[in-house]
Amino acid sequence: MKHYKFFKLSLGWQILIGLILGVILGIVFYKNQAAITAMQNIGTMFINLIQMIVLPIVVSCLTVGIANMGDIKELGRVGLKTLIYFEILSTIAIILGMIVANVLHPGTMINIHSLHGSDISQYMATAKSAKHNTGIWATLLGIIPTNIFKSLSEGNMMPVIFFSVFFGLGISAIGERGKIIVDFLTAVQQVMFKVTNWVMKTAPIGVCALIGVTLAEMGINALLPLGYFVAITYLTMIVFVIVVMGIVAKIFKFKLSDLLHVIKDEIILAFSTASSEAVLPKMMEKMGKFGVNQGIVSFVIPTGYTFNLDGSAIYQSLAALFLAQAYGIHLSFGQQLTLLVVLMLTSKGMAGVPGASFVVLLATIATIGVPMSGLTFIAGIDRIIDMGRTAVNVVGNSLATVVIGKSENEFDDEKSQRYIAKFK
């Protein structure tokens, strides 16, 4: 059977083929409601499969990791270091987006009145319910669960992380008696990684459906008027990954290219599905194999899904200035500084809200005088940009895991090199 191995495609290639087929199906079935419904349902089933396995993996991995770490002072140091790193990188991302918008002026290249708006009612409803639950106190209160089973059923990541950390510390505190729980959760972790491998075999089908339904609903023509803005956003994200993340990797003495090579399948999947959750299980598994201590992996990656959204930060600052320019609103340095501070706060306060990037914009643009109706003009391309920013968010979280691991001397270089060699 060995001669058949030549024809066996890796998951990354399968997902790329699914992506191409999805584009073709989206063009062929443009505005075909029956096809759109079918693709939407298939894509939703794939995302649901991923969501089914995310929380069991987070709970088991994080609890076991913290129990093995055992030292509350070490955990506090790691937690503080992680949050500071997240804030620095996301602030740099916001500033980069603002610099690009000020230099290239994408908003002046379009006639805002010639664009057709899209429906943003779903985001308006979310923003209305979310704006009463933002700010530092609301964010802190939202982290502490009153009922862990309610948080699990609703998929609220931060309360689950909070509980898992304390549960892990409790297991460590009772010593030998807690070993049975660690053994049980370790077995759960291994089972869920096996289930993840099965679920990932359906990824090409899910990607095909999700891309197909996006193009079938929008059509290629919807992208053309705003193509310049889309191109600038993607270019800025690429510069951020190559330059900013590359510098960070160099400071901590490892090659960003090695990391990108290892997680390339996850980058493609995140891009295709526009879902960070779709890659969370495999990211946690791979970063452990990459050489980072499992306790750090289990803490940094899930936390990063709320606090470390570099791609989203770039998009939010670019989009806010793009709309201001399109409406002919000149922003002074002071106003742009205010925008920076507002984005730093709102992006953290709404990180767990569905459609968070768009909701953050809804909460932000009013501070710079842009009509809320302006968002209807970029709502149509949000899915296309969401693909790019999700991929950048995934790369950012994997980078953060290695950085924190190295800063804590919890990174195994030999293990990393052996794992990297498998991908070359």
Image (cartoon, rainbow, N blue to C red):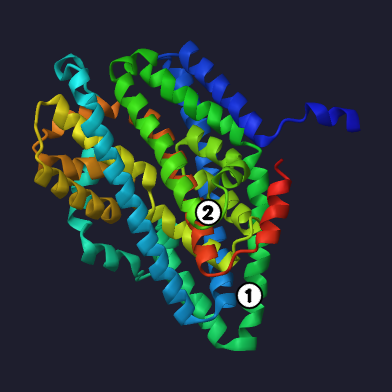
Q: What residue is shown with label 1?
A: 182
Please state if 43 lies on the left or on the right of 416 as rendered.
left
The x and y percentages for residue 37 are 45, 25
Which part of the image, by quadrant, shows the N terminus? top right
- Image label count: 2
The answer to whether residue 418 is visible is yes
Q: Quadrant of residue 203?
A: top right
Give amino acid for label 1: Val
Mark 1 or mark 2: whose residue is earlier in sequence: 2
Which part of the image, by quadrant, shows the C terminus? top right
Please state if 192 lies on the left or on the right of 88 as rendered.
right
> Residue 14, relative to residue 346: is it above or below?
above
The answer to whether residue 353 is visible is no
Q: What residue is shown with label 2?
A: 54
Q: Residues within 10 Å of mark 2 (few under 14, many from 20)?
A: many
Residue positioned 54% across, 46% down in the render: 256
